[in-house]
Image (cartoon, rainbow, N blue to C red):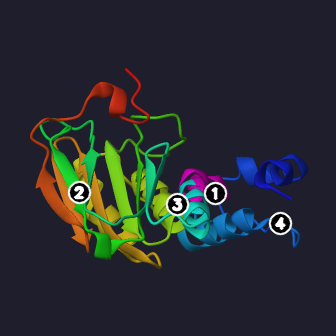
Amino acid sequence: MELEDYIQMHPEFESALSPIKIAENAPLIARKMAEASNCTGVGPMASVAGAIAQMSAEAAINEGTEEAIVENGGDIFIFAKEPVEIGIYSNSTPLKDNLALRIMPDETPISICASSGKMGRSFSKGKCDLALVVAQNAFIADAAATFAANLVKTAEDINHALSETLKIRDVSGIMIFQDGMVGMAGRLPSLIKNEKGLKTELITGLIS
């Protein structure tokens, strides 16, 4: 049974905004999404993009490829053999698109997931410009990014969101951008300046 089939039989899995009990015969992806939901308190679908990114990358590695980078809706899972630079579009002036993360091969596998209350089509309870979470587990990273973004409505919420998100199991680091301010906590890859900025067509989830 795959995820779409499971959702057809259990539509509450798709609509829930908090953890729910899942069926014993749920597919692996649904069970892992439910576990991430239980760890973060958000609904299981909050981790779906990260889940697909991770499982796709793992499938490629299992088939024999040495390197896999899968991006899905702004959520990324990486197995790398050489340094990788990931641009950050924060929607928060003056930082906006002039920062990036440099991922070294020995830091992978790694997941970088983002959530926003102002960009993209995902539901958010907050008004966060961007919450970015780093973890080895993309299910957790994606759900935790949603959790963090839900907590932020103004820049005054940054510190609280940072500390609460770092309490989540397996979260390595977090960045929050809000109203021109940025907060960072935990262990993050190297932060570098993105001299050239980002081309609009390369920004996943941007709605103009």
Residue 42, can we see it?
no
Image vertical order of residue 85 relative to residue 141, above or below: above
| Residue, disc 3 | 143
| Residue, disc 2 | 101
Of the image marks 3 and 4, the number of the one nearer the N terminus: 4
Of the image marks 1 and 3, the number of the one nearer the N terminus: 1
The amino acid type found where label 2 is placed reads: Leu
Q: Please state the horizontal and vertical placement of residue 121, each as a whole percent of the image.
A: 52, 34
| Residue, disc 1 | 43
Q: Please state the horizontal and vertical placement of residue 68, each as a whole percent of the image.
A: 46, 59
The amino acid type found where label 1 is placed reads: Gly
Q: Is residue 51 magenta?
A: yes
Mark 4 and 2 residues: CB-CB less than 8 Å, in contact? no
| Residue, disc 4 | 26
Q: CA distance from mark 4 to mark 2?
A: 36 Å
Position of 111 compared to 83: left or right?
right
Boundaries of the magenta span: 44-52
Q: CA distance from mark 1 to mark 2?
A: 28 Å
Within 10 angstroms of label 2, few (less than 14), some, or many (20 or more) residues? Answer: some
Q: Residue at x 14, y 44 (%)?
A: 194
The amino acid type found where label 4 is placed reads: Ala
Q: Please state the horizontal and vertical placement of residue 86, each as a whole percent of the image.
A: 28, 51
